[in-house]
Amino acid sequence: MDALLARLGLALAIGLLIGLERGWRERDAPDRSRTAGIRTYGISGLVGGIFAALAQALDAASVLVAGFFGFAAVFTLYKLREAAHDEDFSATGVIAGLGVFALGAMAVVGDYQAAAGAAAALAAVLASREVLHELLKRLTWVELRSALILSVMTAIILPLLPNRAVDPWDALNPRQIWFFTVLTAGISYFGYIAVRLLGTTRGLIVSALTGAVISSTAVTLALGRGATTDKDAYPLAGAASLAAAVSIARVGAIVAVVQPQVLLTMGPTACTAALGFCLCGLVLLIGYSKRDGVSQPIRSPFELGPLFLFASLFAVVAIVNAALASHIGTRGLLATSAISGAIDVDVAALSALRLVGTSATAETGADAVLSAIAINSLLRLVVAIASGPARFWMPLLVASGIALGLGSLTFALLPSF
């Protein structure tokens, strides 16, 4: 009996929660001018719980079904009258009322925790009307397509892939490789959202930092091209240094998700190198005052071609890493990580991390990730030299030297701690 009373109380609370949002939205309406407010929604949840309790006590699911259809008919009838009076074509209120009844019933005879969570989610969605409508206005087809692709990658493709190795070296696990692809794509997409929200022309620092979440190499290339027509290239070099720091932070985020124990080993070295890039970037940006930003074409990271290329490259590097690690040990892993790091630092890091715990230790994985970061930093410097004048790449060369030097010093001193 006590348990039933508690569940009925939850059903009432669910209705009151939804009614609070609905009532607040219509708080300025005259009395008796609205079909449902906080009291009606609260009672609706309680009625749903009562019908569910009766159905359970009588062992007759038809009682709950009949109660639901009866409630739906009465509630919809009154909402239709209100809609005709207000010339309102929204069905949100009706759907919310039906949801309250169903969640109230679920709180009594189902998983009450799931019912409470679903009620909170429903209230959040109802309260986010303006935000969601504004988002739809700003959303482009490319962004919508990218979100849909990410959903398909995560909810449909990932569960269907076999979760076992299909090669002699136990390296090519389709589900694992696709999971890492989804992880990297998700991080890139969040960076894309940051660019859309903040804008690429609101400031040189903002554009460089947000662009580096997607590709620090692309940012360096854009800044180098901009420096060819600008006499004051030091702020651009400073922005490139900050982008390099963000690249290291992005790899650190991937490591933290995939293999947290590796982050404990490589963290101090990576943080020191990132700090070096940050300090040099800030020094170079001290004279920054006149610039609005750097225009750089940032597109959605979910073009199918690059996406499948990433997965294929990851699979090849994973197989090569595992094969070399099984034959020549640690040196093979470090070599392939350094080579693949010149192509894509995320691929190099993920390929090395997946071997941790099998054919590689956490220390070996950390060394492989650090070597990939170092090689990728050198690649960015090559891009800067090829795309920009000396007044752009020379400060970046100094910043890279300081950052890599500080990182190497920390790496050398780690055993003493």
Image: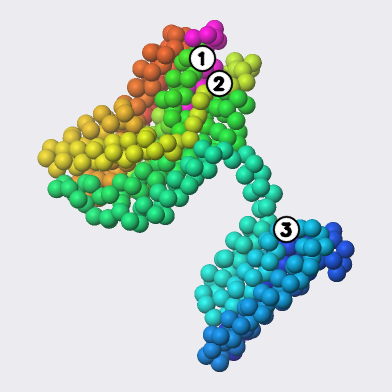
> Which numbered marker is on residue 226?
1
Instruction: Tell me where residue 245 appears, x and y as whole percent.
Output: 45, 29
Of label 3 and label 1, which has the lower sequence position?
Answer: 3
> In the image, is residue 231 part of the stretch drawn in magenta?
yes
C-alpha span from label 1 to label 2: 8 Å
Reply above or below: 263 against 37: above
Asked if disc 3 and disc 1 are in contact, CB closer than 8 Å, the reply is no
> In the image, is residue 195 part of the stretch drawn in magenta?
no
Q: In which quarter of the image is the N terminus?
A: bottom right
Report whether 361 appears left or right of 245: left
Dominant secondary structure of the residues highlighted in magenta in the image: helix
- Amino acid under disc 2: Val
**Which region is colored magenta?**
228-243
Asked if disc 2 and disc 3 are in contact, CB closer than 8 Å, the reply is no
Residue at the extreme bottom: 58
Instruction: Tell me where residue 274 appears, x and y as whole percent.
Output: 44, 30
